[in-house]
Amino acid sequence: MTAAERPSRQRVVIAGHVQGVWFRESCRRQAEALSVRGWVRNRDDGTVEAVFEGARADVEAMIAWCRVGPPHALVTSVVSTAETPGGEVGFTVR
């Protein structure tokens, strides 16, 4: 197994104009296209939080996607924290 194929899990917090712009649904679609598991949710502070789990390369691709987001988003920061893979199943919007 190559480093890119090893299981990875990242918790990501995205800030900027990221609520009310279809960020969560777009994120779900992108995650499913990459076979990344986990979830995404809005937080009370106006940020979006997500957990991505899957092959390292796919998780990194999701983080890269979050730096841009959907067309109407304006992302100002993305902070990711590595976590131990927990066996997420599917990808949900919370």
Image (spheres, rainbow, N blue to C red):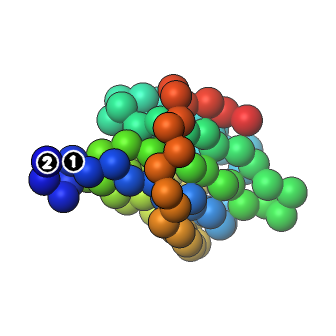
Residue labelled with disc 1: 5
How many other residues sit within 10 Å of disc 1, few (<14), some (14-19) or many (≥20)?
few
Residues under labels 1 and 2: Cα distance? 6 Å
Identify the image quadrant of the C terminus.
Answer: top right
* Extreme residue in the left direction: 2
Query: Is mark 1 in CB contact (under 8 Å) with mark 2?
Result: yes
Residue at 20% x, 54% y: name it.
4
Q: Is residue 64 left or right of residue 18?
A: left
Disc 2 secondary structure class: loop
Residue labelled with disc 2: 1
Q: Is residue 42 left or right of residue 77?
A: right
Residue at 36% x, 31% y: name it.
35
Question: Where residue 46 sits in the image (x, y, percent)?
Answer: 79, 60
Question: Where residue 89 sits in the image (x, y, percent)?
Answer: 52, 28
Question: Where residue 1 sits in the image (x, y, percent)?
Answer: 13, 48
* Vertical position of residue 63 compared to residue 30: above or below: below
* Vertical position of residue 81 compared to residue 92: above or below: below
Residue at 71% x, 44% y: name it.
41
